Image (cartoon, helix red, strand yellow):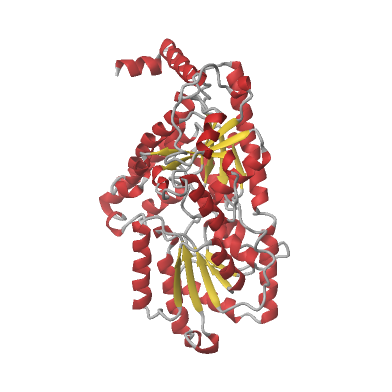
Amino acid sequence: MALLAWLACTPSGRAFWFRRVAARKARGLRSLPLLLLQQQDTSSSAGADVAAPVPAEGGNDSAESGRPTVVAFFHPFCEAGGGGERVLWTAIEGLVRADADTHVVVYAADRIVSAGPAVTPKDALLAKVKDQFNIALDPSRLSLVFLKSWRWLEAKRYPRLTLIAQSLGSLVTGWEAINLLIPDVFVDTIGFAFIYPLVKLVFGVTVVAYVHYPTISSDMLGVVREGTVSFNNKGSVSSGPLRLLKLGYYRWFSSLYSSVGSCADTVMASAANSTWTFNHLNDIWKVPERTKIVYPPCDTRALVGFEASLRERTILSVAQFRPEKAHSLQLEAMHLLLEQHPEFRDGPLKVYLILIGGCRNADDQKIVDDLRKQAKQLDLENNVRFIVNAPYADLVSHLSRSSVGLHTMTNEHFGIGVVEYMAAGLIPVAHDSGGPKMDIVVAADDGEPTGYRASTAAEFASCLHAAFDLNPATSAAMRERARRHVAGRFSGDAFQRGFVAAVRTAAATAAAEAVAAPGQPSRRKKED
């Protein structure tokens, strides 16, 4: 403890530590030499992509050696198929396309290694990215650093006090990552802010945060304060003394989250609901001058060409199978729709609900199994289909044919799926909160509606019926309005321009600080 106090609290201790970090950089540990990265990429042996610290003679700073800038993405679950992974891989695509002198590293869970003897882990991962997101990447521009401690990030490991326990657990994985490779720029795209002080203050690396959803927000505090029952505020703790204890715990965690989040050099608020995410981040982290809005990428280019008319009588739901996505509410709404309009159950007016989503693990699969049971109990078996981990081509096919897009998550930070519905020509029926309410399913420039919003099962059922009850001309006009509203504003190109600009600024700042004070990380004061 005395040693830690000396390192942290005395000028001589801090100077000693910074000299150690600078020495590691000079030995080649700040960024692995490009030659080593390329050798790993072309090797076909097992574990070829596993980056390990390898000493090298002489300095390795990019400003001194002319080597590429190394940008490392902290996204251990990079093989998952959700909206967060679309952001990750679209960002990487934009970065390698825009900057020839940038080499990208992804800190990945070592479970990806099990790809079989004939295929390297990276090849298997990039094939999956191409299949799910239609993003093709040059393997020579990307390397993987595998992390053994990724299980510390899983929420299921912490059944109690999940917020603080998972955040502290992330320090274990963050420590492993930064010790395996100290990059020029560290980009967090998964949302573990407690790592930022470690990366920024201890190792002097510039931190860029792309925030999908704050770990805690005033909305979460409000749910507990008002005693509202939700998926993360069960009935047993939504009232009485436990509610007060949880409220105090949330307020304490919020203060910690504020401190660690403010360590980021650049903050990008994911969202067309930036009105939501951006405001919450500024409320908690209080660094508006370093926070900017970069709308997440939506595959509008591939979708806007679909014929908007002649659609099947299908309701499409696209969302990972997770508790907060509220798929159960969709089944309840479908049940009410068929009860109130039995002609939709069978015959020429029959309506289907198709739920497409990714399953990351056994917990997600259990959600699917429970939803299947619920569909059977509600007598929906002939009107509901589940498609798990669908290839990108299948998803696009359904988007091109379906009539209505359904979204039921409360306070969705953005809603990529909703934007894709609208770009593809579907009429959106989305939850009346978060991004869909504030920026996506809103009136067009001419004041006319672009879709429907609802909150309860009854409201969703009513909106679904209204969408199917439109006459052909009104329906076609709404679809085209919705498409025009989202096509340019939320495109992948717009996202990549904003993301690349933010990373370039961060890299320039890192280079300037390295020249001004080599080996001595700057300690930016938190603005009042």
Rendered location of residue 315, percent (x, y): 53, 73
Residue at screen point 70% across, 79% down: 473
Q: How many marks?
A: 0
Nearer-the-camera pick, 235 or 384? 384
Residue at screen point 44% across, 83% down: 339
Nearer-the-camera pick, 398 or 403? 398
Classify 380 as above or below 185.
below
Classify 123 as above or below 426.
above
Residue at screen point 67% across, 71% down: 478
Rendered location of residue 125, percent (x, y): 49, 49
Nearer-the-camera pick, 205 or 450? 205
Tell me the quadrant of the picture where the N terminus can be found: top left
Residue found at the far right of this picture: 446
Q: Is residue 288 left or right of residue 56?
A: right
Rendered location of residue 507, percent (x, y): 61, 30
Q: Is residue 184 visible?
A: no
Q: Is residue 27 left or right of residue 64?
A: left
Residue at screen point 65% across, 79% down: 310
Q: Is residue 300 visible?
A: yes
Nearer-the-camera pick, 480 or 203? 203
Q: Is residue 460 left or right of residue 471?
A: left
Q: Quadrant of residue 58?
A: top right
Rendered location of residue 491, percent (x, y): 66, 54
